[in-house]
Image: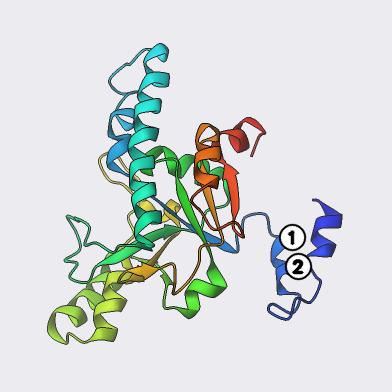
């Protein structure tokens, strides 16, 4: 444990009253959530291992994927907001558009970006919670059905959001995926940077200089590939 950093985190900032110090000693906890920008850009790479692609293929494909992800990232920054969407699901009947985030710590974020692109937009959980973002809840079939039935028979803004935050928890077995490792949060509707400025950003190191010219100078910018190389 990094004792000096933990102790310094206990300083009362007027916002967290020392809670950050206690949380900082829990290395499986993050005060941030991250939205990654392009699931589709990584599609070839996600399938590469099972398709027996050679090692030399990855570098070129990662370059292409990063450029596609950057195009999406640049559009988000230019438009000044994250846009909500209704994702496809073979289990849930979503009707409210939302934005997905992960509260994973750095190792989980590095793994996460291999599915969703290597450009991330970071918010403080305490701030985005005040705007309405909430963590997802993972439920067994019995309790998931209770909430789904409530959503279908007694539709209301509160019931609908509760259903959209509920995820069917299925312990892994062949052909079944359990997404609880994503530690997902959801925000309903678009999120403007004027409403809440991002705390920071992730990007591949080769894009850092480019991104520095378009983001808020008060936010942090972390090279995700360098964090991996350093052992995060």
Q: Picture quarter containing residue 41?
A: top left
Q: Give residue 107's position: percent from left, percent from top.
A: 57, 43
- C-alpha gap between disc 1 and disc 2: 7 Å
Query: In terms of depth relative to the viewer, which is nearer, 196 or 159?
Result: 196
**162 sits left or right of 33 in the view:** left
User: Which quadrant would residue 113 be assigned to in this image?
Assistant: top left
Badge nearest the viewer, 1 or 2: 2
As rendered, which of 134 and 91 lies closer to the eye? 134
Q: Residue at x 28, y 34 (%)?
A: 43
* Residue at the (79%, 77%) spot, across then down: 12
**Mark 2 lies on residue:** 21
Q: Residues within 10 Å of mark 1 (few under 14, many from 20)?
A: some
Residue 102: % across, % down = 45, 57
Lateral position of residue 217 relative to residue 164, left or right: right
| Residue designated by label 1 | 25
- Give SS at disc 2: helix
> From this viewpoint, which residue is outermost toward the front?
213
Q: Identify which residue is drawn at 84% across, 63% down.
A: 7
Q: Could you say which disc has been placed on residue 140 in the image?
A: none
Residue that appears at 80% across and 70% down: 10
**Circle 1/circle 2 CB separation < 8 Å:** yes
What kind of element bears circle 1? loop
- Counting other residues with Cα less than 10 Å from the Cα at mark 2, is it few (<14), some (14-19), or many (20 or more)? some
Please say if 211 is above or below 53.
below
159 and 203: which is toward the camera = 203
Answer with left or right where residue 39 lies relative to residue 95.
right
Residue 210, percent across and down?
50, 40
Number of residue marks? 2
| Image: 152 above or below 220 | below
Looking at the image, residue 158 lies above or below residue 218: below
């Amino acid at each position: 444990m990094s004792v000096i950093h933990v102790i310094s985190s206990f300083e009362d900032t007027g916002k967290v009253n020392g809670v950050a110090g206690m949380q900082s000693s829990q290395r499986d906890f993050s005060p941030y959530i991250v939205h990654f920008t392009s699931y589709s850009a990584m599609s070839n790479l996600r399938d590469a291992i099972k398709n027996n692609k050679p090692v030399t293929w990855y570098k070129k494909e990662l370059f292409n994927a990063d450029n596609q992800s950057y195009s999406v990232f640049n559009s988000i920054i230019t438009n000044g907001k994250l846009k909500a969407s209704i994702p496809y699901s073979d289990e849930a009947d979503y009707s409210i558009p939302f934005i997905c985030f992960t509260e994973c710590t750095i190792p989980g974020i590095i793994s996460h970006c291999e599915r969703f692109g290597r450009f991330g937009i970071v918010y403080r959980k305490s701030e985005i919670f005040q705007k309405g973002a909430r963590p997802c809840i993972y439920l067994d079939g019995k309790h998931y059905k209770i909430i789904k039935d409530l959503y279908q028979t007694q539709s209301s803004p509160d019931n609908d959001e509760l259903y959209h935050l509920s995820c069917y928890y299925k312990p892994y077995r062949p052909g079944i995926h359990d997404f609880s490792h994503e530690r997902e949060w959801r925000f309903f509707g678009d999120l403007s940077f004027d409403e809440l400025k991002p705390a920071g950003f992730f990007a591949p190191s080769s894009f850092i200089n480019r991104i520095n010219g378009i983001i808020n100078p008060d936010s942090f910018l972390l090279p995700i590939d360098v964090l991996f190389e350093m052992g995060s």
